[in-house]
Image (cartoon, rainbow, N blue to C red):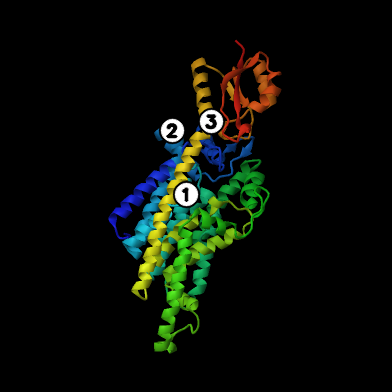
Amino acid sequence: MLHSRRLFGAVALLAIVFFSLTNLPWTLDEYSQERQALASYDMVKEGRWLYQQAPRDRDATKPPLIPWISAALHEVTRSWDVAWRLPSFAAALALAWLIFRVARDRFGKSAGSLALSAFALNMLSPRLATLVRTDMPLALVVFMIGWQIWNKIETGESWNRRDRWLIFLLLTTGAFIKGPIIYVFLLPGIAFFQWRWRNETVGHAWCGWWPWLWSLGLFLTWVMGGLLTQPGFFDQVVVHEFFGRFSTAEQRPHPPYYYVGHLLHKFAPWSELLIILAAINLRSGGRAHRNAEKETAQNLKWKRGGARFAVARMSPGVCWLLGWSLGGLLVMSIVPSKRLDRIFPLIPPLCLLIAAQVDRTFPNESVRRQTYRWSAGALALSVILTSQYSLSKVVLGYRDHWDALVTFGRQVRNEATARHWRYEVVTSHDGGMLLYLDKPHFIEPEQAVAVWNRGALDALVMRASDAGTLLARLSGATVSSLRSQAPKGERRKEYVLVVRGQ
């Protein structure tokens, strides 16, 4: 089954379907998507190409690379939805293809199909594939760096000038996608590998200092420019966005095992398969150890225990995959501020670890059949779980009207265009409303009252809960019949359109 070419085609088709549909209906109302979207919108509308302005007079907290790409895509497609979501979608497809190709070339067709399945069929990849976020592009860059390191380890080749320039470009790209967090996903694994193989002749994971320092230097140059030219940059970007990861001011504290528990859930059944295959490997390693001990005990480095034997015989390449994935997980688990999407770059190396377990040399036919049986079972279960997850997300999204603000914004724009209205949106906590209404900024309530009463506005969009207070202060104002339908369980997100009485 795992050798079938039809399996690859079926998994690839499912990946495209799940990646495309899971986030429908498209909105910007969760996972801080509006912040990323507003950065590129601000570039196009306001011309702020290096440092953007977020709602409520805050500096945008994201590095500018992905917003640059979205701004360029908007110029080509003239669609913000496409411009915002295509970078993540394209990165997801590229990652899926690279994971399959790398696993197939190194471990064989069966392992390649299984690695592709692990990446595509879970509750993380389809969810992030079309979110307006930077997690998927960052995961692609981290994977490309980890892949280059793996190649050097496997081939034993030394790092040359061209290789170092490539690492420098990739590191700089990652830093300008999501900041210096890219170093967290790579340096712990590199340090572990260099320590583990310090006394043996194998390929090096470390390419030298200058690609890392130069890429960090370029990013810090951007930060320094913000500190010198943007009044609130230090508090809002340096303190809130970067150093805020090491506090629980923005998110409630989570225990160190938070990410492990969520990986067991969201990456199921592949996380469980990894544990099962590792147990099979250790058990068969123990048997091989006992057999080898009888024959060549004097040549064994480890004298006791199947686990030690398994570690001793682990290849440098697999050791790198283990350090790459678990090193980043360990460091991210120590960081107090936690959110599940932040560890997504660890998923690709975990997929390769699954492929490595399937490819390993089996001590007997029974272990081989057992490994393939568990793998096939995990694949079948992953199809069921991912299908159920994606279908339920789409059905609930449309049933509970999670696109209510999107629909309302489109209706207001159409009405304003037809009637030639001058309109604004009163300050709220829903940054996405600005984008739904094609506005770069909110208007404060006091300013809205003043501008309205001097006749410079024809319509105002505001939360329904604020309408009662403001309406009495707006001369000749009335509430239009056009109002948003509140998403289920989100009454605070109900908006109304206030117009001048006829």
Seen from the viewer's position, the closer of residues 415 and 468 is 468
Secondary element at tag 1: helix
Q: In this view, does 181 lie above or below 24?
A: below
Residue sitting farthest toward the top: 502
Give the amino acid at mark 3: Ala
Give the Cα separation between the discs numbered 2 and 3. Answer: 20 Å
Give the amino acid at mark 1: Met
- Mark nearer the N terminus (2 vs 3): 2
Q: In this view, does 318 lie above or below 465?
A: below
Secondary element at tag 2: loop
- Mark nearer the N terminus (1 vs 2): 2
Residue 151 seen in the current view: no
Q: In this view, does 3 lie above or below 489?
A: below
Residue 90: x %, y % from top left = 40, 45
**Which image quadrant: the N terminus?**
bottom left
For residue 209, the mark is none
Residue at mark 3 = 404
Residue at mark 1 = 136
x 48%, y 50%: residue: 123
Secondary element at tag 3: helix
Give the Cα separation between the discs numbered 1 and 2. Answer: 21 Å
The image quadrant of residue 86 is top left
Give the Cα separation between the discs numbered 3 and 1. Answer: 27 Å
For residue 79, the mark is 2
How many numbered marks are there?
3
Seen from the viewer's position, the closer of residues 283 and 457 is 283
Q: Residues within 10 Å of mark 2 (few under 14, many from 20)?
A: few
Q: Which mark's residue is nearer the viewer, 2 or 3?
A: 3
Residue 43: x %, y % from top left = 52, 36
